[in-house]
Amino acid sequence: GCNPLAETGRSKLQNQRAVLNQQILRAVRMRAGAENLLRATTNNKVREQVLLELSFVNSDLQILKEELEGLNISVEVYQNAEETFSIPLVPLGLKETKDVDFTLPLKDFILEHYSQDSSEYEDEIADLMDLRQACRTPSRDEAGIEMLISYFLQLGYVENRFFPPTRHIGVLFTWYDSFTGVPVCQQNLLLEKASVLFNIGALYTQIGTRCNRQTQAGLENAVDAFQKAAGVLSYLKETFTHTPSYDMSPAMLNVLVKMMLAQARECVFEQIGLSGIRNEFFTLVKMTQEVAKVGEVYTLVNTAMNQEPVKENIPYSWSKLAQIKSDHYKALAHYFIATILCDHELQAGDDEDQQEKALSQLYDYVPEGLMVLAVLKDKVQRKQLGKAHLRKAIVYHEEALRVCGLCKKLRNIEVLQEVLTAAHKRSLLKYAQQETEDDFLSLIQAPDILPKTEHKIETIAPQFSKVKVKDFFHKLGPLTVFSAKQRWTAPRTICLHHEAGELGFSLKGGSPVQVYCLDPVCSAASAGLKEGDYIVSVGGMDCKWLGVNEVLEKLRSVGKQPIELEVISCQDTAASLHSKSATYSMGMQKTYSLICLAMDEDKIDQNKKSPLKLPFLSWGTKNRQKAASTLCLPSAVAGSSQTKKKLSPFTLLNTESSLY
C-alpha cells in the first residue's frame, strides 16, 4: 500500500474523511444518549434541557454531513494533473475502517479447533494483518487493485478456516458509510468482504478520473476503468443483497452503477471528438446522436438520484452535476444539428436521399408543416429550423449555468464554469451570425433529438481468477477437510507394527488420505485405529497434503520397524445455529442510525444436552478493550417486543447466512 503519512492531495482527503467519521461517531453517541434520557425522564425541566441539547446535536450532525459531502465533490484532487478543458468526472472515496487485531482470536481458534500449536502461525496472522492495513491506503493503479482483490480472496480462505456458522470468534469489524459517516459493526466477515469490494470499485473510479483525457490511450483507459468499476459495484449488489450500510444498499449501488456507465459514455464521446470535429454533414449527424446519448444517460442518472431512499444520502452536488451534464450535452446536440442546417446547404452534387435519411434519423417527429426533404432544399426553412435548435441550445446552456451557480460546491469548480460559459458563448455567437429580421415571424419549435450510438458501454465483471492467491494458513491442511465447519477429534497417536508385510488396512481419497477396509483384528485396530480415520502425520512428518501413493511410500520406507501415525476422526458437524440475527437501529433516525448486530438466543431445555456455546461477547482482553470504544456493542435482548418495532430498513432476519 501507499505510505499512510504521505502528504498527497488524495491522502489528505482520506485523512479528513477519517476525522469527520470520528466526529460524526461522537455526535451520534451524544444523540443516542439524549434520546434515551428523553424517553426515560418525566421531569419537564430535564426534558426541555434534553430537547435543547438534541437540537444542537442535530445541527452539528447536519454540518458534519455537509462537510463530508464537500469531500465527496472534491473532484479536482482526483483529476489528471495535466491542463484540461473538460468537465470533471466524479470518483468514489474509499470507505474507512478501524484497526482489527486477529492475533488472539485466531490463535485461540487454532489451538481449540485444530489442536495445533498456535505459536507456529504467528507469522501468517501477522501477514494477514499487514495485508489488511495496506489495503486501507492502496496505490491508485493496477497494483492497488490487485492488492485489494488478493485481500478479498484471502478473506474467503479465512472465513472458511476460522468463522464457524455456529458462533462468533470475537472479531469485530467496523466500517464507516462513505456518504453519511455512520459506522456499521458486525462480527462476521460478510461486512468486511462487501466493504473491500466497494473499495475496489471506488479505486477503479479514482483510476478513471486520473487518466489523461487529452490522449486517445488515456480516454480508452478511463472508459475501461469506469466499466470495471460498474462491474464490481454490480457484482456487489447481486452478491451481497442485504448490506446494513446505506452506501452499499441495492438502491444506492444501482445509482452508482448508472453514474459510472454514464461517465464511461462521456469519455467515449470525448474520444470520438478528440481529433477534432469536422464541419461536414454526416460527421455532424453522427456527433449529434452520440452527444444526445450522453445527455440521455445523465438524465436517467439524475432521475435515479432524486428517488427515495437514495435522495436522502446521495451528495446533493452529485445530483446537480448530473443535471448540469444532462443540460450541457443536450445543448451540444442542438448546437450540432443547428450547424448542419445553417452551414450546409444542399448542393448540386450532394446525395439528397442519403442526407434526407440521415436527417430523418435525428427526429422522432418534425414540426407540423415541414418535410425533411423540403427543409433540405428550402433555404428559409433550413435557417428557421436551425435557429430554433440554437434557441433551444441556449436555453439548455443557461439552465446548466443557473444550476451550477445555485450549488455552492459546484460554483467553486473553475474548469466546470469555464466549459459551460464557453459553450454558451459559442451558441450565442452562432445565433448572432444568423439573420434576425424574421425572429418574430418564426413559430417553429425545435423537436427533440433521438439519441443513438455505435459504441456499446456495459459493465465488465471482475476477473478475480486472474489474481493468484496462496492461502496464508495452508499448513492447516486441505480446506475441504480442515475448515471451521468440520469437527473432529484431537490427533491420536497410533503405533503401527507391520504384520508379515501387511498393514491391515487400505488407504483411499486425495489429501489427506483416509483409512478404509480396516481388519478389526490387526495390530493397528488394536492400537485404536478406526475405519474412516484421516492420517495427518507419519513418523512425525506432516502428511495432510500427501496422496495415497506418497503416504504408502512413507510407510514402506521404514521396513519392519514400528512407526507412529497421527490420525483424526470426523465428528457430527450438525450443530445448533443461532436462530435470530438482526440489525437494530436503536430507535434513532435512519440517516444516522447506529447499526449493530443483536442476537436473541433461543432458550435451551435444561434437561436436553446441547453443545456449549461461547458467549456472544467472548473475546480476549485486547479485543474487549478495543470493543469498549466502538460505537455499538452487540447486545442480546430476549423477549422484547418493543425492540423489534425499531428495526432499521436493513433489518436482517433468520440465520446469520441471510445477512447477505
Image (tube, rainbow, N blue to C red):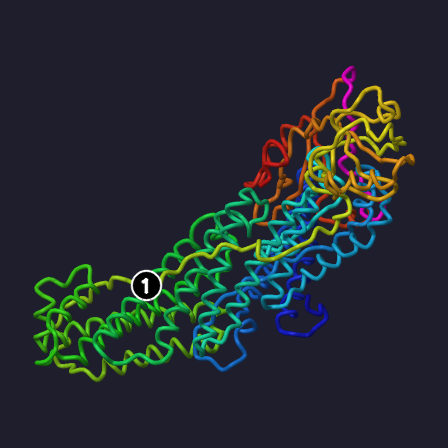
Q: In this view, does 374 lie above or below 38?
A: below
Quarter the N terminus occupies: bottom right
Residue 559 lies, in percent from the top left, at 88, 38
- Residue 75 visible? The answer is yes
Looking at the image, the residue that sits furthest to the front is 500
Magenta segment, which residues? 606-623
Q: Nearer the viewer, residue 201 or 447?
A: 201
Question: Horizontal and vertical percent for residue 432?
Answer: 23, 83
* Main secondary structure found in the magenta portion: loop
Taking the image as shown, residue 254 lies to the left or right of residue 15, namely left
Q: Within 10 angstroms of label 1, few (less than 14), some, or many (20 or more) residues?
A: many
Query: Label 1's element?
Result: helix
Q: Quadrant of residue 477?
A: top right
**Residue 392 in which image quadrant:** bottom left
- The amino acid marked with disc number 1 is Lys
Q: Is residue 638 above or below residue 9?
A: above
Residue at horizontal 60 percent and vertical 62 percent from the top: 145
Q: In this view, does 393 lie to the left or right of 371?
A: right
The answer to whether residue 308 is left or right of residue 375 is: right
Provide the residue designation for mark 1.
293
Q: Residue furthest top?
A: 607
Residue 60 visible somewhere in the drawing: no
